[in-house]
Image (spheres, rainbow, N blue to C red):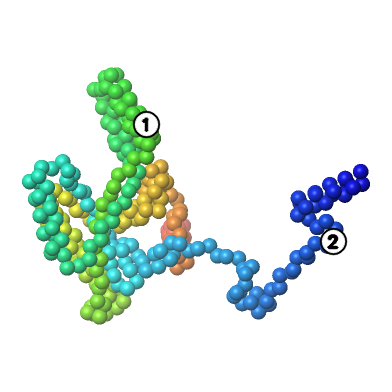
């Protein structure tokens, strides 16, 4: 029985990977920290890692997005145009050749870079459904059969969207131009920035109009993407699945109706808003005092 107990004890210690004789295990060596490295925060393996600044690194060269332009730090500007393509394979052989000739003639005239960006989005049928519901509510001459048919069709559309992932492809053209700042003269920095933006917008808009006029012959429609459209494009880029339920248009409307602005603001902007509020309150107090004097 004694031998059996000793054997069971040894077997248990081996399975648990513990020392057979208590107190004979390896002692953990304490980690020595270099005080200098710990003070300076350099080469310290135990220093907490900072969260990666993905967006800051991704848009490090972007200065601003305004006036339908993307402003870069090196005085380069980009303008984006949305392309409504033609259904090439539904055309006849003669029409396809005409489209090819038109597109080739446009590309032959390009002496500046043009990028094509394709974005796959989940199909959003919320807007058509809202329009159908609005029509059915406002129409007074619809009978019960027409209303039931409309409701059944809306239910089928929703079920069609939920049954499998549905995608649509958006096509964009990006035109980029860099301004030579030395060729522009101005009396102040504000005037210089304004002239730079005006010159960049005029040149890039000329390129968009050239593409619009030439590709129109092939039934390819090109339209300028405004500032809000650029933000929406970026929103769908980084929120592919979330953008179906939380639409960018709804977020903009909620922001307009919000009592306080929820976006991140700089300290100077916050101070300016506080000063404006204080000036408004001071003016209101002065008016109230003037009214009290007149009444007395």
Q: Which mark is residue 81?
A: none
The answer to which quarter of the image holds residue 143 is: top left
Whether residue 257 appears in this view of the structure is: no
Please name whichever residue, 26 or 64, is drawn nearer the observer in this view of the structure: 26
Mark 2 burial class by Cα count in 10 Å: few <14, some 14-19, many 20+: few
Q: CA distance from mark 2 to mark 1?
A: 68 Å
N-terminal-most mark, 2 or 1: 2
Please name whichever residue, 269 or 103, is drawn nearer the observer in this view of the structure: 103
Q: Which residue is mark 1?
A: 159
Please name whichever residue, 219 or 271, is drawn nearer the observer in this view of the structure: 219
Most distant residue in the top direction: 144
Q: Residue at x 74, y 69 (%)?
A: 30
**Residue 121 spot, x, y in % from top left:** 34, 46
Q: Secondary structure at mark 1?
A: helix
Please name whichever residue, 236 or 96, is drawn nearer the observer in this view of the structure: 96
Vertical relation: 149 (above or below) 77: above
Q: Secondary structure at mark 2?
A: loop
Most distant residue in the right direction: 2
Q: Which residue is mark 2?
A: 23
**Residue 281 spot, x, y in % from top left:** 46, 60
The answer to which quarter of the image holds residue 291 is: bottom left
Whether residue 156 appears in this view of the structure is: yes
Mark 1 burial class by Cα count in 10 Å: few <14, some 14-19, many 20+: few
Question: Quarter of the image containing the N terminus?
Answer: top right
Q: Residue at x 29, y 36 (%)?
A: 128
5 to the left or right of 39? right
Q: Residue at x 32, y 48 (%)?
A: 120
Most distant residue in the left direction: 94
């Amino acid at each position: 029985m004694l031998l059996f107990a000793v054997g069971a004890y040894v077997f248990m210690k081996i399975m648990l990977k513990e020392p057979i004789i208590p107190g004979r295990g390896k002692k953990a060596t304490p980690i020595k920290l270099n005080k200098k490295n710990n003070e300076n925060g350099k080469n310290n393996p135990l220093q907490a890692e900072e969260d990666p600044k993905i967006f800051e690194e991704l848009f490090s060269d972007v200065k601003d997005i305004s006036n339908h332009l993307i402003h870069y730090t090196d005085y380069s500007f980009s303008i984006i145009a949305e392309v409504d393509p033609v259904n090439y394979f539904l055309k006849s052989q003669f029409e396809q050749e005409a489209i090819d000739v038109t597109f080739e003639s446009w590309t032959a005239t390009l002496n500046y870079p043009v990028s094509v960006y394709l974005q796959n989005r989940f199909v959003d049928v919320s807007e058509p459904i809202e329009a159908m519901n609005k029509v059915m509510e406002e129409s007074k001459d619809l009978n019960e059969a027409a209303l039931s048919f409309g409701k059944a069709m809306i239910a089928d559309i929703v079920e069609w969207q939920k049954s499998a992932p549905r995608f649509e492809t958006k096509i964009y053209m990006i035109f980029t131009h860099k301004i030579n700042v030395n060729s522009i003269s101005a009396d102040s920095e504000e005037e210089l920035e304004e002239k730079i933006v005006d010159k960049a917008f005029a040149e890039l808009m000329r390129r968009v109009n050239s593409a619009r006029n030439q590709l129109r012959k092939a039934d390819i429609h090109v339209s300028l993407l405004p500032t809000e459209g650029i933000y929406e494009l970026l929103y769908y880029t980084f929120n592919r699945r979330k953008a179906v339920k939380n639409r960018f248009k709804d977020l903009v409307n909620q922001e307009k109706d919000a009592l306080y602005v929820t976006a991140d603001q700089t300290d100077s902007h916050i101070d300016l808003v506080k000063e404006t509020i204080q000036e408004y309150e001071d003016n209101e107090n002065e008016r109230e005092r003037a009214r009290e004097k007149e009444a007395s």
